[in-house]
Amino acid sequence: MEWLLDLGYFGLFIGTFLAGTILPFSSDVLMVGLLAAGGNPWLCLLVATIGNWLGTILNYVLGWLARWDWLEKLCKVKEETLVKQKKNIDRFGLWLAFFSWLPVVGAIGVIALGFYKVKPVWSNIMTLIGCFVRFFFWVLLKGLLF
């Protein structure tokens, strides 16, 4: 992860994008690292939010275009998991998109939203808001601690 920090804002963008996808990656450590290294908090917030949001959009599109067998083979998401997510979609709706930043469950939730073609514009607006809130927390915390 240190090599991403060496790339500065571009590294933050790459890291947050990867974290927004199905890949297991922690963008919070990267965000905190760049803030601690003296990165501009507002630029970090913008770059991290956009990078992470684009990663979640990729998940949504993967879900939208996916077939059961394809998801299971490439993304390791089993059919039973998406069926279970359908119950969550029916129960929580677009709030699943807001919590897209949660590890593993968030990515699967966004893939499921795409798979079931749940309100594309609103799903992606909710993921944008969720990504923003997540990284805004770190900017606020930095302001309180440094």
Image (tube, rainbow, N blue to C red):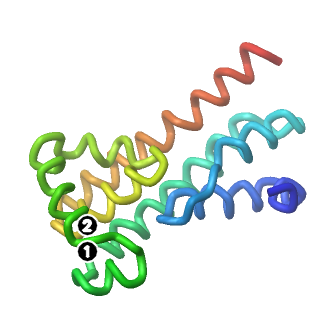
Q: Which residue is mark 1?
A: 64
The mark tally for this picture is: 2
Q: Which quadrant of the structure image shows residue 129?
A: top left
On screen, residue 58 versus residue 120, left or right, reads right
Q: Which residue is mark 2?
A: 114
Instruction: Work out whether 45 lies above or below 59.
Output: above
The spot of residue 89 in percent (x, y) is: 16, 50
Q: Residue at x 42, y 40 (%)?
A: 130
Percent x, y of residue 56: 44, 60
Tell me residue 47's x, y (percent).
Answer: 65, 51
Q: Position of residue 32 (x, y in %)?
A: 74, 37
Q: Residue at x 67, y 21 (%)?
A: 141
> Is 39 displayed left or right of 122 in the figure?
right
Tag 1 secondary structure: helix
In the rendered image, which quarter is residue 143 located in? top right
Query: Are there few (<14), some (14-19), or many (20+) residues within 10 Å of tag 1?
Result: some
Residue type at numbered disc 1:
Trp
Of callouts 1 and 2, the N-terminal one: 1
Tell me which residue sits at (10%, 48%) in the image. Answer: 90
User: Observer-nearest residue: 36 or 120?
Assistant: 36
In this view, the residue in front, 62 or 103, is 103
Measured Cα–Cα span from mark 1 to mark 2: 4 Å
Screen quadrant of the C terminus: top right
